[in-house]
Image: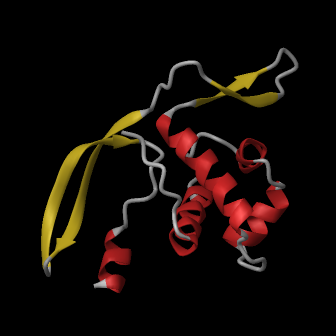
């Protein structure tokens, strides 16, 4: 079953900030902005510099683009002149990777091992878990 829930603004800001700070995210900020239908300068102002407010329209667009990227519904294509563009795939091909990490559960650290989408930044880091707990 597909998750139709839109990330709350604070959660989306945290996720996209981590997404933009990762140099190995697999998509440029400009192409991600094109995918979401928002100016890349405006996205940087919202998520990196935090100088602009996040509107509901931008929230929904960025959420949809991010989820499409994580699920592998989108591919980066290249023209003969080496310019790149974003294209939706007929069949999703998510990029998966092995994952090992620590989780804080009921005040105790536990090792989590498994397979997860490579570009999924929605999982809290250990620092973020400690700040919340």
The quadrant in which residue 19 appears is: bottom right
Specify the farthest residue to the top: 80
Residue 92 at x, y percent in the picture = 50, 25
Tell me: 119 left or right of 64.
left
- Hey, which quadrant is residue 22 in on the image? bottom right
Compared across the picture, whether 122 is left or right of 10 comes to: left
Q: Residue, x 13% and y 65% (percent of image)?
A: 110
Q: Of residues 13 and 81, which is closer to you in this image? A: 13
List x then y, in percent, for residue 43. 75, 62
Q: Which part of the image, by quadrant, shows the N terminus?
A: top left
Q: Give me the residue at 78% from left, 43% from top.
A: 34
Render colour scheme: secondary structure
Quarter of the image for residue 59 reads bottom right
79 lies above or below 15:
above
For image coordinates 36% across by 67% down, the residue present is 125
Position of residue 42 measured from the top left corner of the image (x, y, whole percent): 82, 64
Above or below residue 130? Residue 6 is above
**Where in the figure is residue 101, as x and y percent of width and height?**
25, 58
Q: Quadrant of the C terminus?
A: bottom left
Q: How many marks?
A: 0
């Amino acid at each position: 079953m597909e998750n139709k829930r839109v990330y709350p603004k604070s959660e989306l800001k945290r996720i996209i900030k981590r997404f933009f700070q990762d140099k190995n995210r697999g998509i440029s900020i400009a192409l991600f902005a094109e995918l979401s239908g928002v100016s890349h300068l405006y996205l940087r102002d919202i998520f990196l510099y935090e100088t602009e407010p996040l509107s509901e329209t931008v929230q929904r667009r960025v959420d949809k683009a991010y989820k499409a990227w994580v699920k592998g519904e989108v591919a980066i294509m290249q023209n003969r002149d080496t310019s790149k563009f974003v294209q939706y795939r007929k069949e999703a091909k998510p990029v998966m990777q092995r994952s090992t990490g620590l989780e804080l559960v009921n005040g105790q650290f536990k090792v989590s091992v498994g397979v997860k989408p490579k570009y999924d930044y929605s999982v809290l880091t250990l620092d973020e878990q400690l700040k919340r707990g």
